[in-house]
Image (cartoon, rainbow, N blue to C red):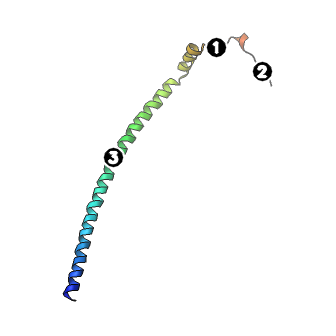
Amino acid sequence: MTPRTQILINGMLLAGVLLSGVGVVYAKYLSRKYFVELELLRTQWEQNEIEWGRLQLEQSTLATHGRVEKTARRRLDMHIPAPQEVIVIKP
């Protein structure tokens, strides 16, 4: 091997090692960046789950028969019909 070839090979190996090191550092940076983003998304997901539970509880409270009947009587002036008010339609 000539000294020139040996210097060229050593230079290429040095460049490869440096590029590999930069690649490792960049990959670690991306890994940390995406981990932080993942944790933020998990936090948001947990908050959404809590809100979803609250909304389901609120919906079940608002949809109880007693509340629906009370609202129908108050807002729509509805009442249970008397027997003489009931009309039966036969096919």
Task: Specify the quadrant of the image occupied by residue 86.
Answer: top right
Q: Earlier in the sequence, mark 3 or mark 1?
A: 3
Q: CA distance from mark 3 to mark 1?
A: 55 Å
Could you say whether the residue bearing mark 1 is in a helix, strand or loop?
Answer: loop
Amino acid type at image mark 3: Glu
| Residue at the (24%, 71%) spot, across then down | 17
Picture layout, residue 40 above or below residue 60: below
Real-space Cα separation, disc 3 to disc 2, in angstroms: 62 Å
Tags 1 and 2 in contact by the CB under 8 Å rule?
A: no
Q: Is residue 21 left or right of residue 70?
A: left
Q: Secondary structure at mark 2?
A: loop
Give the residue type that dot 1 points to: Ile
Q: Nearer the viewer, mark 3 or mark 1?
A: 3
Cβ–Cβ under 8 Å for marks 3 and 1: no
Which of labels 3 and 2 is toward the front?
A: 3
For the C terminus, the quadrant is: top right
The residue pinned by badge 2 equals: 89
Work out which quarter of the rendered image holds the N terminus and state it: bottom left
Image point (24%, 66%), residue name? 21
Question: In the image as oriented, which residue stretches furthest toward the right?
Answer: 91
Above or below 51: residue 29: below
Q: Give how far apart the Cα atoms at labels 1 and 2 are.
A: 18 Å
Q: How many marks?
A: 3
Q: Residue 49: x, y in percent? A: 42, 38
Residue 51 location, x and y as percent? 41, 34
Residue 31 image offset from top left, x and y in percent: 31, 56
Q: Is residue 40 left or right of residue 57?
A: left
Q: Is residue 40 above or below residue 3?
A: above
Q: Residues within 10 Å of mark 1 (few under 14, many from 20)?
A: few
The residue where tag 3 is placed is 39
The residue wearing badge 1 is 80
Q: Residues within 10 Å of mark 3 (few under 14, many from 20)?
A: few
